[in-house]
Image (cartoon, helix red, strand yellow):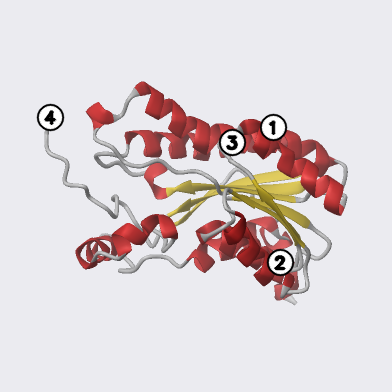
Amino acid sequence: MILDLFRLDGKVAVVTGAGRGIGAASALALAECGADIVIASRTQSDLDQVAERVTATGRRCITAVADLSDLNAIRTLAEVAKNEFGRLDVVVNNVGGAIPLPFLDTTTEYLEEAFHFNVATAHALNLVAVPLMLEHSGGSIINVSSVMGRVAGRGYAAYGAAKAALSHYTRLISKDLAPRIRVNAIAAGSTATSALEIVTSTPELKSMMEDLTPLHRIADPEEIAATVVYLASPAGAFLTGKVLEVDGGTDVPSLDFGLPDL
């Protein structure tokens, strides 16, 4: 049956930024499809809630509290998967982000931090994950990028440039790692995560985001997670080096900060 192609029985996945939002939804979705999971974020209580939901599916879940901006900390996640489960098959690089700022407030240091948090962290984990994937049948790397890596708007210089770099990094390393390891990305549109709560709790801002999205709504984290499952599973076995735009048809930033001309 076609649904069997979405199964991940016997596989092991690492998901970063998995305490809430897209990461939490992705961890749960992968578990529902049969994978055992290593989840990481800064907050133990958040991880415990996700782990409880994962174990309720019958799968095993290991939590790792870590500052995921620390490259040494993020590298340990592959080792956790190896030690606890004996293998690693799927990596979801979900950690990332940067607060939009006006151009003259976007310091060089802030730009570097955005690239570090969104690109270097993914690369650090991938470097240690790939040898473990190659010990078995290969694997799948999924980088969670953003529509802001493709569209332009004021205030997004650091975040947008970093996510654009992550998207192209995906294309580049897919060539390095083919044919045994597939590498894809998701350019996510506005999604109802805790990071957007300050926006979605304001009716005017929420309405703006919906109006600027052709589907006239904000994505649920589960909709991004469903794409993660597709890319991780045999269903997506003929995709590599691709950036799937899961953005409700967005062609402009869904949040306009109204920044004035300089």
The residue at 75%/72% (across/down) is 4
Residue 192: which disc? none
Residue 175 makes an appearance in the image: no
- Image coords of residue 182 (percent x, y): 69, 46
- The residue type indicated by label 1 comes to Asp
Q: Which residue is mark 3?
A: 121
Label 2, secondary structure: give it.
helix
Rounded to the nearest whole Å, what is the CA distance between mark 4 and mark 3?
A: 34 Å
Which numbered disc, 4 or 3, marks the residue that appears first in the sequence?
3
Asked which quadrant contains residue 227, the reply is bottom right
> How dense is the environment of label 3, judged by Cα within 10 Å: few (below 14), some, or many (20 and up)?
many
Which numbered disc, 3 or 2, marks the residue that appears first in the sequence?
2
Label 3, secondary structure: give it.
helix
Q: Which residue is mark 4?
A: 262
Residue 230 position (above or below residue 132): below
Q: Which residue is mark 2?
A: 31
Looking at the rendered image, the disc whose residue lies closer to the viewer, 4 or 1, is 4
Residue 172 position (above or below residue 99): above
- Image coords of residue 208 (percent x, y): 22, 61
Instruction: Out of 76 and 182, give the one closest to the viewer.
Output: 76
Which numbered disc, 1 or 2, marks the residue that appears first in the sequence?
2
Q: Quadrant of the C terminus?
A: top left
Residue 176: which disc? 1
Instruction: Out of 223 and 171, give the one closest to the viewer.
Output: 223
Rounded to the nearest whole Å, what is the CA distance between mark 4 and mark 1?
A: 43 Å
- The residue type indicated by label 4 comes to Leu
